[in-house]
Amino acid sequence: MNMFCYQCQETLKNEGCTVNGICGKKADTANLQDLLIYVLKGVAVYAEKAKELGVKDNDSAIFIARGLFSTVTNVNFDNQRFEKMIKEAFDVRDKVKAGFEEVYENKYGREFNGELTEAASWYSEDKAEFYKKGQEVGVLSTKDETIRSLRELLTYGLKGIAAYTDHALILDETDEEVFSFLQEGMAATVDDSLSADGLISMVMKAGEVAVKAMAVLDRANTGHYGSPEPTEINIGVNDRPGILISGHDLKDMEELLKQTEGTGVDVYTHGEMLPANTYPAFKKYKHFVGNYGNAWWKQNEEFEKFNGPVLMTTNCLVPPKDSYKDRVYTTGLVGFSGVKHIEDRKDGGEKDFTGIIEHAKRCKPPFEIESGAIPGGFAHQAVLSVADKVVEAVKKGTIKRFVVMAGCDGRHKTRSYYTELAQNLPEDTIILTAGCAKYRYNKLDLGDIDGIPRLLDAGQCNDSYSLLVIAQKLAEAMEIDDINELPISYDIAWYEQKAVAVLLALLYLGVKGIRLGPTLPAFISEGVLKVLVDNFDIKGISTVKEDIEAMLAGE
Ligand code: SF4
Ligand code: SF3
C-alpha cells in the first residue's frame, strides 16, 4: 500500500483508496497531502502553546485554513503546489515557534525545553523525503481504530470549516473564534493524551464552530452580493462564445463578470456556481446567460460540449480529459499539473482574467445540451419573507412535512435514490436543499403548495446555513422549543468534507434521526457509529419506500 485515503464517499469499496484515488488523486499526491496536514498540525501545536501564554496568531490559522482546504477532495492534484505549500508550512511553523519561545523566555527567564510531538519538529529539504514521510504519517499512523476514526472525523470537519473560512476571508470577513478552533482542533489530532471522550467533545465543538463559520460566510456573501432572490435560471445557451465558471468562489464570479462585460463573451455557471444566478449583484449583467449542465461529476462530458474555456474556482475538479484540458483554467487553491493557473490577487487588486477571455473569443459558442429554466434563490431571507404563509400552510395541514435533502452529488448509481425519493414524496411535502445534491431532482417538475414551490433551493453547500436558519425561525414562529418537534426530516447526501462539517453542525444543534447516504462514511468506525446512533439516532438510507414511510411517520 503506498497511500491511504478514505475521506470521501466514493472511497474504494467504502474502505479506502490504497493505490490511486477513485477521484483521480495519485498516490504521490496523497502522500504530499498527508505530509502537509502533518506539518499543519505541528503549526497548530505551537499556536496552542503560544495561546497558553496569551499570544494569538491569526496568520497561522489562515495558513492552516488554506492548507486544509487544498486537501479537500477534488481541489488540488498538483504535486508542485503541495511541495511549495509544505515548505511554506515549515516557515510558518518556525515563525509561530519563535514567537512562542520568545514570550516563554521573557516570562520564565529560560528556554523552553518541553517535549512536543514530532509534527512540531519534523523537517527536510529533500523533496524525496516528503513523499516517504507522507506515507508514514497518514491516517493509518494512528493504530487505535476508535481514536483514528475520531481524529479523522475531526480533521474532515476542520477541512469543511477551513473551506468556509477561506471563502469568507476572500470577502474580508473573519472570526477569531473560528481561527482559534482551527488551531485547537488540529493540535488535538496529535495529542496522545486526549481520550476518545476528549476527542468526541472536540468533534462536537467542531459542529459549533461550523455553525459559526457558515454564519460568517453567509454574512460575507449576502453583505457583498445581496440576498439571493427567487429566480428562474436559464439552462439554455446563446450563440456567442462563453466562459463556464464552476466551484464556489463568488469573488471570482464577480470579477469575471466585470471583466467580460462588453467583450462579446458570455458567462455561464456549472455545478455549484449555479446559485450565483440568484444574487442581485450578478443578475444585473446581461451577458450572464445562465447555468450549463449538471453536478461536478458530469464535467468530463459537459466541459467537452461547452466548447469554450472553463474556470475552476474551488472543488470539484475532475482530472480533465485531453480533449478539453487546454481549455481548463484553475485559480485559487485549485490545481492540476499541466493546466493553466490564474494567479491570486495582488495588493488589493483584481485577478487578471484577460487570458481566459481572449481564449473564449477564439472558441465556438456552447453546444446546447438542454433548454428551459430551473428555480433557485430560496435562501433564508427569501423563505423567511414568506414565513407567515409557510407557517399557515403547516397549521392548515397543506404542508405536512419538510425533507432536507441537502449535500453533495456523486457518481454512484445508488444516488438515483434521491431522484426517486423526490419523485415519490407526497404532494404535501416540501424539499429543502443546498449543495450539488440538488441536481438529482432540480429538473423535475415538483409543483407548488399554495404558491410555495415544493423544491426550495437555498444555494451552494456553502449556504447550508440558510437551512439551519429556516429551521430555527420556523421553530420560533410555530412556538416549538425542541427543533426535533418540527415536521422536518433530514435525508442528507454527502461526498466531500464540507458535508462533514454540515453534519457536525446539525448534530451540535441537536438534530436527531438524520439519514446519511448513499453510504455511511468509511472513516466512522463501529465504535464511533455506536456513539452517533445512541446519541443522535443517525442512520443510513434504506429503500425509497421505507424511508418515505418512516419520514412521514416522523422517524
Ligand atoms: Fe479516494 Fe476520496 Fe480520498 Fe480521492 S478523496 S483518494 S476518492 S477517499
Ligand atoms: Fe458538490 Fe463537490 Fe459537495 Fe458543494 S461541488 S456540494 S460535492
Image (cartoon, helix red, strand yellow):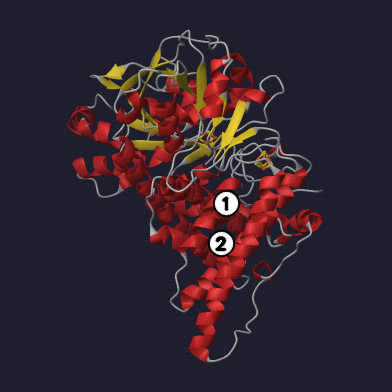
Quarter holding residue 140: bottom right
The front one of 399 and 363 is: 363
Q: Is mark 1 within 8 Å of ligand 1?
A: no
Above or below 312: residue 370: above
Badge 2 marks a residue whose secondary structure is helix
Chain-order first, disc 2 or disc 1: 1
Give the quarter the ligand 1 occupies. Answer: top right
Q: Classify 286 as above or below 158.
A: above
- Closer to the camera in the image, 49 or 337: 337
Residue visible at 37% across and 50% down?
Answer: 173
| Label 1 SS | helix
Question: Please, what is the three-letter code of the amino acid marked with disc 2?
Answer: Met
Q: Residues within 10 Å of mark 2 (few under 14, many from 20)?
A: many
Which residue is under mark 1? 68
Along the line of sight, the residue nearer the viewer: 191 or 418: 191
Q: Residue at x 63, y 49 (%)?
A: 523
Which percent across, then down, holds residue 312? 55, 32
Q: Is residue 77 left or right of residue 197?
A: right
Label drawn at residue 410: none
Residues at marks 2 and 1 touching, judged by CB atoms closer than 8 Å: yes
410 in relation to 114, above or below? above
User: Residue 186, which numbered label?
Assistant: 2
Q: x%, y% of residue 138?
A: 71, 56
